[in-house]
RNA sequence: CGGGGUGUGGCGCAGUCCGGUAGCGCACCUGCUUUGGGAGCAGGGUGUCGGAGGUUCGAAUCCUCUCACCCCGACCA
């Protein structure tokens, strides 16, 4: 076979970041494009990561008083029309169902038949259909709050799909709540924002900037939109989750009213919030390296892979016996919100190939076990946060004792590294020239906090730089500043970046 | 939807200008040798050359139409 490149993934991040991203997904066997344009097939390894994300979040939603339910995939077109900004925001990317059966076509094949009286759209988000139901369910203040979530697929007909980051169909959760007061709804919106940020940082090991979206970046129909913005290794921003305070906009549009304790009828205050399979894309771009995927242990499909090494049947049975006992002891241990997940891979393929496969798939700990190790009652351990060749021999008892703390070290190390990278690429900028230099075509870019004002001319300038306002950070201090473009007074800095 | 590009075994590509029985690498299968590291040798299977028309004795190659995908823009979780 030809000489191996120094890295398992080619091109490297430095050579071509977008292509590297695609190659990591392929090498780790996470997902593939499908025959249906814009839609992807999520393969078992990728799906397992998503399942872990789902389970962890779902537990947290439930722990904060939410319940799951399910609403229809199809939404009558007229529902979308009810909220003006909402229509405008989504109309351009809706899949529309106009017929309900097929019939033989004259020239062979099939053609749609049975036109629907009213076209249905495939949900791009479910505010309208859920609001319609809430309006029926809510009579009095005693019915509030309603705190529901659904795990679902949605469709937004995208022109330029990218695996996980932007696909026509994607999976997500959407929380929808209705409250009696604005204050309570705002508290809900912010509580979920914190929940998302905590999840991103402590489970995904992905540092984020929490903040509020500027007017132009808000969810269509929302009063305010809050976001967590993560920074990828190419220093571009990824909107990783959003939480919206919808005010009474949707309640008004859908006649969602309750009778208050004083006998006065009022519109509800609603929120919605979601994270999607895009998180998997963020995970990949946050941690992975030129040898492939790196999954933070808390979300890894498997924490530890055991690779038996043997030459003949006698060694095989001896080694496998040793491995089985290891599996038992490891899987009995608690890690994060479950047990240690171990994969014993005794497939009859070459050791090097096998080992590289798990490097590329990002398994946190790889363990090689051969006759020599058994003779010394030890195991040969490699960690995904170290070089592929950097392996150490540990006694069996020591390895078993240290396994979960090693996982913690890897998890913490990934976070620390990502956080350092994000901080290093975050700056404050106070004049237009410096801003333009920071985001120049050949500059590395990053996050830039600057004063600004939301004007058409400023938008044009930003467009030219391919930069968008990401958010006004929650921890931004009030200060007297001036827009670096127009000189208008500004109270808080906005974080700008190129984004996905 | 604008601008550019590409469609040839599972994957990546050559061949197209200048028409003449479809090739290479990887992967796959079999056997032997190897085996603490993405193995070596030998043998084997794999294609209506994106589709439809046309020109021609003959089309992957020329002409017309069409479809799909990719990249760059506009839009976005």
Image (cartoon, coloured by chain):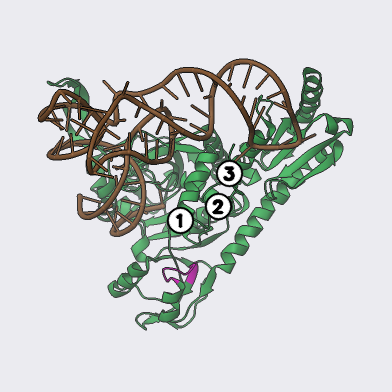
What chain is the green one?
Answer: A
Specify the subunit that label 3 lies on: A
- Residue A42 position in % (x across, y down): 47, 35
- Residue A132 position in % (x across, y down): 31, 42
The crowd level at tag 3 (other Cα within 10 Å; few <14, some 14-19, many 20+) is few
Q: Which residue is at a point 70% across and 41% down the rendered structure image? A: A365
Distance between the Cα atoms at labels 1 and 3?
25 Å
Type of secondary structure dominating the magenta stretch: loop
Q: Earlier in the sequence, mark 1 or mark 3?
A: 3
Label for residue A239?
1
Of tags 2 and 3, the one toward the viewer is 2
Q: Which residue is mark 2?
A: A195
Magenta range is A439-448
Q: Is residue A435 left or right of residue A369?
A: left
Q: Is residue A423 in view from this perspective? A: yes
Q: Residue furthest right?
A: A376
Q: Which residue is mark 3?
A: A63
Label for residue A37?
none
Q: Earlier in the sequence, mark 2 or mark 3?
A: 3
Residue A401 image-quadrant placement: top right
Q: Quadrant of the C terminus of chain A?
A: bottom left
């Amino acid at each position: 076979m030809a000489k191996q490149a120094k890295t398992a993934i080619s091109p490297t991040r430095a050579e071509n970041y977008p292509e590297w991203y695609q190659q990591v997904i392929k090498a780790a066997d996470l997902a593939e494009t499908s025959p249906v344009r814009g839609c992807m097939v999520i393969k078992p390894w990728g799906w397992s990561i998503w399942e872990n994300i789902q389970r962890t979040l779902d537990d947290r939603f439930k722990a904060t008083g939410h319940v799951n339910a399910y609403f229809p995939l199809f939404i009558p077109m007229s529902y979308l029309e009810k909220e003006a900004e909402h229509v405008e925001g989504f109309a351009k990317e809706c899949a529309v169902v106009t017929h309900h059966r097929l019939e033989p076509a004259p020239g062979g094949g099939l053609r749609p038949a049975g036109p629907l009286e009213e076209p249905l759209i495939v949900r791009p988000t479910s505010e309208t259909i859920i609001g319609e139901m809430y309006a029926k369910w809510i009579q009095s203040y005693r019915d509030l709050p309603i705190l529901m979530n659904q795990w679902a697929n949605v469709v937004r007909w995208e022109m330029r799909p990218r695996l996980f980051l932007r696909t026509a169909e994607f999976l997500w959760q959407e929380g929808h709540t209705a409250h009696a007061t604005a204050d309570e709804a705002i508290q809900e919106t912010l509580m979920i924002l914190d929940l998302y940020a905590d999840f991103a940082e402590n489970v995904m090991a992905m540092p984020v900037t929490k903040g509020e979206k500027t007017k132009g970046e808000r969810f269509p129909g929302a009063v305010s939109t809050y976001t967590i913005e993560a920074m990828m290794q190419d220093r571009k921003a990824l909107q990783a989750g959003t939480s919206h305070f919808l005010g009474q906009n949707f309640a008004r549009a859908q006649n969602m009213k309750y009778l208050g304790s004083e006998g006065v009828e009022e519109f509800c205050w609603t929120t919605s919030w979601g994270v999607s399979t895009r998180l998997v894309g963020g995970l990949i771009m946050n941690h992975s390296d030129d040898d492939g995927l790196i999954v933070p242990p808390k979300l890894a499909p498997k924490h530890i892979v055991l690779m038996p090494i043997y030459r003949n049947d006698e060694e095989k049975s001896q080694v496998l016996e040793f491995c089985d006992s290891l599996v038992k002891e490891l899987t009995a241990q608690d890690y994060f919100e479950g047990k240690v997940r171990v994969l014993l891979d005794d497939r009859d393929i070459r050791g090097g190939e096998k080992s590289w496969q798990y490097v590329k798939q990002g398994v946190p700990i790889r363990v090689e076990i051969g006759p020599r190790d058994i003779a010394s009652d030890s195991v040969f351990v490699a960690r995904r946060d170290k070089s592929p060749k950097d392996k150490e021999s540990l006694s069996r008892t020591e390895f078993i004792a240290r396994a979960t703390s090693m996982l913690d070290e890897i998890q913490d190390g990934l976070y620390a590294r990502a956080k350092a990278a994000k901080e290093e690429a975050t700056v404050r900028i106070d004049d237009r020239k410096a801003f333009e230099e920071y985001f120049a075509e050949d500059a590395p870019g990053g996050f830039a906090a600057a004063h600004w004002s939301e004007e058409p001319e400023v938008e044009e300038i930003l467009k030219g730089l391919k930069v968008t306002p990401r958010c006004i950070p929650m921890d931004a201090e009030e200060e007297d500043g001036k827009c670096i473009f127009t000189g208008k007074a500004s109270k808080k800095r906005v974080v700008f970046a190129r984004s996905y």
